[in-house]
Image (cartoon, rainbow, N blue to C red):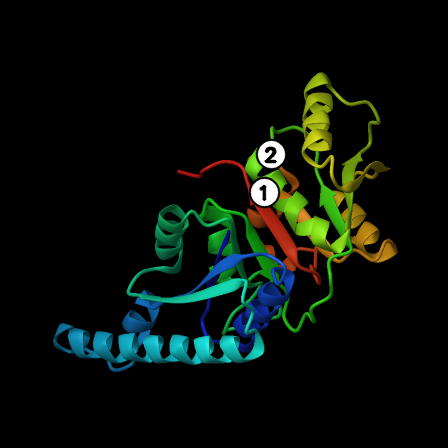
Amino acid sequence: MRQILIPTDFSENAMNAIKYALELFKYERSEFYFMHAYEDEVYNDKALSTRDTFEAVLRVVSKKSQKNLEDILKIVKEISPNPRHNYNIISAYNSLVDEADIIVDGKNIDIIVMGTRGETNDKKLTFGSHTLQVLKYVQCPVLSIPENFKYAQPKHILFPTNYLIPYKRRDLKLLCEMAIPFRAKIDMLYVTNCDKLSMRQEDNMQFIKDALCNNDASFNIVNNKNFIEAINNYIKDNNIDMLVMVNTRHSYLENILFQSAIDILSLNIQIPLLALQNTRRD
């Protein structure tokens, strides 16, 4: 059974991510966990003027969180009464990253689904602060859904990689299983100014070929010194429905996530991004 965690801040973007996940996994037996972590809301509450008011504010925020999650559960059951799906809610006085880590480990979560931006919805940013934290620090694949993205079956998936790192079999199995119900084509893309692969790259490529043996997968090389430009062009020219990247040291995605000025990043992702995680960041 697929284990799916969906953090929510009760924004429209978060609800859009929920709807996308319900459609994407509608053919799979899945256990959904809708989670709200509200530690920041307690400390940012205007009523929290002194330590004497802390417990009262905590009770109010906790009650509101639980009520909002129950409302989401009602909506989900109305729009997706899927016999293959089980739904759970988790309200926690904790930070988003810490609570996500607890649930990922405790429930053996396969994938986290969330919006690229949340309630603050700063359109200058590629990712909102909460999504960025989860992408960087939670050791689990993360599927982020852009604002207002309308669900479409992922028929054409782009997976840029430099083939320099080994891949986790479980992550590639996840991608393989997500693509099969939709008969999706997976395009591997190596952006380089050198056509020759090292032995390590060849071995990692072969590992991917073996893992995706049940999928329609192609292996492509694009000569370009600017990988962001190359990815943007490939998405536009090939009608890509989903972007897959690996988040590890020396990867394309790390270069994006750890830019000092993420708000001016030229990779403006308008399609769902599946970030596969390869190393823990301590």
Q: Secondary structure at mark 2?
A: loop
Query: Which residue reaches farthest left?
Result: 52
Write down the residue under mark 1: 254
User: Toward which corner of the image does residue 216 lie, by quadrant?
Assistant: top right
Q: Are marks 1 and 2 in contact (CB under 8 Å)?
A: yes
User: Toward which corner of the image does residue 271 lie, by quadrant?
Assistant: bottom right
In the rendered image, the vertical position of residue 236 relative to residue 90, given as above or below:
above
Residue at the (22%, 77%) spot, across then down? 59
For the residue marked with disc 1, what is the amino acid?
A: Glu
In the image, is 247 to the left or to the right of 103? right
Tell which of 213 and 90 is nearer to you. 213
Write down the residue under mark 2: 250
Query: Where does residue 119 sit, x and y in percent of width and height?
Result: 50, 74
Query: Which residue reaches farthest front?
Result: 83
Q: Secondary structure at mark 1?
A: helix
Query: Which residue reaches farthest top?
Result: 199
Q: Name the image quarter holding the C terminus.
A: top left
In the image, is 112 to the left or to the right of 268? left
In the rendered image, the vertical position of residue 69 relative to residue 102, given as above or below:
below
In the image, is 114 to the left or to the right of 271? left
Query: Where does residue 164 sit, x and y in percent of width and height?
Result: 65, 28
Residue at the (65%, 41%) spot, across then down? 252
For the residue marked with disc 2, what is the amino acid?
A: His
Tell which of 19 and 222 is nearer to you. 19
Alpha-carbon span between mark 1 and mark 2 = 7 Å
Query: Where does residue 32 sit, x and y in percent of width and height?
Result: 47, 62
